Image (spheres, helix red, strand yellow):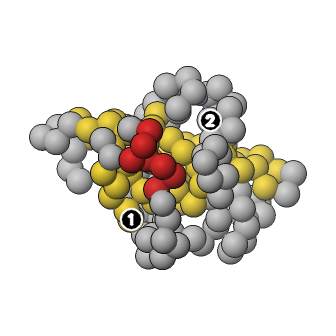
């Protein structure tokens, strides 16, 4: 995807990737930290403070760093939910869902009833795509 991809808070509409990384606030085991994610779908490289105690299979709570709202997906709290907007040759906007579980690589871009999944753990669950076909 060479198109410009912007991630947005579903509550306050703030851009969550002002430059190279998507910035979210993470909470785990009573600790808080800013966590940076690569905005390229399927790239799971992250930048996390060295003292943030995240380990494989930990379920991280994500919050918008601007308005502090909980980003857990209401239909499936094991996922976090953002909005996305793609500009360029193929303009598109919709919802992006990604697993809150550390090490679980599953990301879904949902727009106009279509789902594009990324990550080696995506599609393994027989997911129903959170009722997207009835809500969009
Ligand atoms: Zn927000």
Q: Quadrant of ligand 1?
A: top right
Give the quarter of the image for residue 17.
top left
Of labels 2 and 1, earlier in sequence is 2
Give the quarter of the image for residue 60.
bottom right
Looking at the image, do the residues carrying marks 2 and 1 touch, with CB atoms under 8 Å apart? no
Q: Can the viewer see residue 57?
A: yes
Rendered location of residue 69, percent (x, y): 68, 32
Mark 2–mark 1 Cα distance, whole angstroms, equals: 22 Å
Q: Can the viewer see residue 47?
A: no
Viewer-nearest residue: 61 or 112: 112
Residue 121 placement, left or right of 76 = left
**Mark 2 surroundings within 10 Å by alpha-carbon count, few (fewer than 14), some (14 through 19), many (20 or more):** many
Rendered location of residue 43, percent (x, y): 40, 64
**Total marks drawn?**
2
- Which residue position is annotated with label 2? 64
Does dot 1 land on a helix, a strand or a loop?
Answer: strand
Residue 23 placement, left or right of 107 = right
Rendered location of residue 46, percent (x, y): 53, 60
The residue sitting at 26% across, 38% down in the picture is: 92
Considering the image in quadrants, where does the C terminus appear?
top left
Q: Is residue 41 above or below residue 7?
A: below
**Mark 1 surroundings within 10 Å by alpha-carbon count, few (fewer than 14), some (14 through 19), many (20 or more):** some
Residue 12 placement, left or right of 8 = right
Label 2, ligand 1: CB separation under 8 Å:
yes
Closer mark to the observer between disc 2 and disc 1? 1
The residue sitting at 30% across, 41% down in the picture is: 112
The residue sitting at 54% across, 45% down in the picture is: 81
Rendered location of residue 121, percent (x, y): 49, 74
Q: Which mark is residue 118?
A: 1
């Amino acid at each position: 995807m060479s198109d410009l991809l912007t991630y947005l808070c579903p509550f306050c509409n703030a851009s969550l990737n002002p430059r190279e990384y998507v910035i979210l606030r993470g909470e785990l085991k009573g600790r808080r930290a800013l966590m940076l994610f690569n905005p390229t779908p399927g790239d799971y490289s992250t930048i996390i403070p060295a003292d943030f105690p995240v380990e494989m299979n930990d379920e991280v709570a994500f919050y918008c760093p601007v308005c502090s709202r909980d980003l857990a997906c209401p239909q499936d709290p094991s996922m976090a939910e953002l909005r996305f907007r793609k500009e360029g040759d193929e303009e598109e906007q919709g919802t992006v869902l990604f697993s809150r579980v550390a090490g679980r690589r599953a990301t879904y871009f949902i727009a106009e009833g279509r789902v594009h999944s990324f990550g080696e753990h995506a599609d393994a669950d027989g997911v129903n795509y959170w009722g997207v076909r009835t809500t969009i």
